[in-house]
Amino acid sequence: MSTAQSTKLLSPNREHTRTGMSKEALKQAYIDNLFYIQGRFREVATSHDLYMAAAYTVRDRLLARWVKSAQAFKVNRARTVCYLSAEFLLGPHLANNLVNLGITKISQESAAELELDFAMILEEEEEPGLGNGGLGRLAACFMDSLATQCIPAIGYGIRYEFGIFDQTIENGWQVERSDTWLRNGNPWEIPRPKICFPIGFGGYTEQYRHADGSLRHRWLPSLEINGVAYDTPILGYGVGNVNLLRLWKAEAPQSFDFQAFNVGDYYGAVHAKIEAETISKVLYPNDEPEVGKELRLKQQFFFVSCSLQDMIRLHLNTVGSLDTFANKFVAQLNDTHPALAVAELMRLFIDEHGMAWEQAWTITRNTFCYTNHTLLPEALETWSVALFERLLPRHLEIIYLINQDFLNQVREKFPDDETRVIRMSLIAEGEQRRVRMANLAVVGSQAVNGVAALHSELVKTTLFNDFYDLWPEKFHNVTNGVSPRRFMVVSNPRLADLISHTCGHNDWIRDLSLLRHLEHHADDVELQQRWREVKIAAKQDFANWLQQQTGVVLDPQAMFDVQAKRLHEYKRQHLNILHIIRLYQRIQQNPNQEIVSRAFIFGGKAAPGYYLAKLIIKLINAVAEVVNHDPLVNGRIRVAFMPDFNVKNGQRLYPAADLSEQISLAGKEASGTGNMKFSLNGALTIGTLDGANVEIREEVGAENFFLFGMTAAEVTAKQREGYRPWELYHADPELKADIDLINSGHFSRGDMVLFRPLTDHLINHDPFMVLADYRAYLECQAQVSTAWSDAANWDRMSILNVARMGKFSSDRAIVEYAKNIWNVPPVTVER
Ligand code: GPK
């Protein structure tokens, strides 16, 4: 665009550039923003400047709706959901906001007229990676659906300065690099320096006589820091509703260094300031196992206290009394990370607002609901009483009091059952006494839910069986879902267009059950053909990107067999590798056999301290190195590890998959959500009866799902009778040959010890029963290959699969929460 053109665009008679949705208004706004916010004209603008101008253009349009929403919620005194989560794995905002505003097409046209590279501008955005995996991404999908379903909501979390690390692969190993997502600024957030709360740590508690004559407790912390709000608007799809994501940043108070400064310890004072600010510095990068670090507990208390103080402020602003707090708010605890909220709300009510214990407890219990996301024992949070006492002395007192009342209730209902009391206590006794956060969350909540039908059953019958005996009505299931906006419309526009064209409308984007209509067309040869073209095009796009990232070349005609998720033994990426090694050995033995060409694609990060998970990444890359260069294989199988699997790269991958690997040991994956993302993009699933796989299979039909492996009940039975993996290793010659080939150094340039920690562990312990499911997995994979060979039928299955996946929209999940758990009605905001 020439300077003359920009001048022409600056005409006085134009639609309002802050809110206008016409092409002219958008173009005008873009030029203005480039000029007035970035201080650039086109000829000298960097690609980042061009992105920022686009982001601000979109943000203005969000803000108009946001203010309107805030007004509507205030006037209506709307009941509001507060989603408390230590993680929000949002992914890039720009493309999603364009879709939700309904201006993707017109923006593309505007960009073209301004001679801008639209795709390059979208590519420029650095995603906020404020989460690890499924749990954090679920929170982000829920924010999208809350707004889309017009449910007034605030997401509360932490504004980590460094999100999940960036992963690179060097010499086959994972290398972590810090995620500096804020270095170029974040156009989507608005700092609110005046929304700021003091957060205490340490010190002691005492009783005192309050001015009103009552005897009260108070906490005198030894350290106080501030939490400052940073707000991001979250717009719903095709509605006027905008909700608020409010993330807290830790700052030292102004007065912080005053005393130290006066005695001359300026350096020490600055150091203390830095210390305070470390609280929101970095996300802990481990997915399920808890690290139990002091800073992590500080983070949890920090964001919980900020959020509750904010909720109290908001309520007192409009109502003036806390008696109705639980009518105004319902607070969802996303796992136990925010479970301290139970004790903190009690403290705020009692110590700060003079409420009586009984009333405070009733309101607290009516406020909270808790979602459990895992049964893995190593992931269940406990904190040592000693640490608790040092950091949060008043909260420990309150937890003891809650526990006393609670255990009396247990004794009343189950007399003479002290072992039950010991199991249910909020405190685990033993050499080192510990606070059980899950028990605190259950006791302090009115509703507890699991995230898939199987998981919720196991929650009732195993993990929280004692609590289920006491309060059966408290337990619910809400099967997870994913956002069809982000994981279909934004990430796979070709498929979205084909679906809309076939259905004759795009209403399915807000009511995913309407995908059913595709069933009528599953046998339509023309649709099958176009379906296939869409898939091939997505595979080609992905292959191009992957080649540029890794040098590995994939053939889009090959089956893309994909496993992308956090690296964890329970997810069994190593089972997948054993299958690849088996195919490789079969080719070595019989090079001329007919085999189905497959590209095995892996993606996922390992927790930096999880040695075996990192060794599995190394093994994948080692196998890739050999297989990809073997002349006998001759390209018929390819193995690739895509680096840095995050939301942005996931969006490239989901549309390209033919086969989705969901092969966790039954009973271990609470739900899974990647399974839904792949399936909604037309991949067929090979999977165990675990998590939401069970329901996916129910929906798409057993004949369209490749099932293998033990059931959760069989797993338990086998563990009970004694599992002996070494017997399986010796009994199955192919299994033995696969493991032995790893140990021979074949994939490690003769190094025979490199992978021993992994193979020894499999043979001698195998906690996730890889060997037990190995044979069934191979047989199932053979069925997959047979099915693939009938291309038309595969396409038909793929269409049916998508047609029947409507249940797995996060919109459905949010409507269930709103009706069955939260009791929150929608409030529609005019567009
Ligand atoms: C569960 F406990 C946890 C955790 O710390 N992090 C995490 O991502 C996942 N999860 C489960 O592993 C998935 O099965 C589930 O779909 C997801 O949470 C969302 O519920």
Image: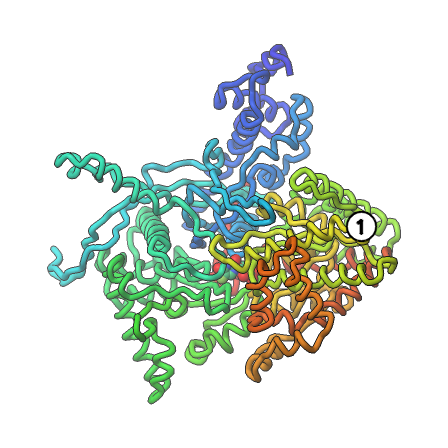
Q: Residue furthest front?
A: 750
Would you place residue 649 above or below residue 11 in this image?
below
**Residue 717, percent from left and from top:** 59, 82
Horizontal placement of 748 versus 79: left or right? right
**Residue 212, percent from left and from top:** 13, 57
Which residue is at 57% across, 65% downward? Answer: 570
Which residue is at 55% across, 49% downward? Answer: 174
Tell me which amino acid carries mark 1.
Answer: Pro
Quarter of the C terminus within the rendering: top right
Which residue is at 38% across, 82% downward? Answer: 420
Of residues 812 and 306, the one nearer the viewer is: 306
Q: Indicate the quadrant where residue 355 lies.
A: bottom left
Would you place residue 659 above or below residue 723 in this image?
above
Would you place residue 478 above or below residue 509 in this image?
below
**Residue 464, percent from left and from top:** 45, 74
Would you place residue 721 above or below residue 587 in this image?
below
Horizontal placement of 206 versus 546: left or right? left
User: Which residue position is annotated with label 1?
Assistant: 631
Q: Residue furthest bottom?
A: 416
Which residue is at 87% across, 60% downward? Answer: 593
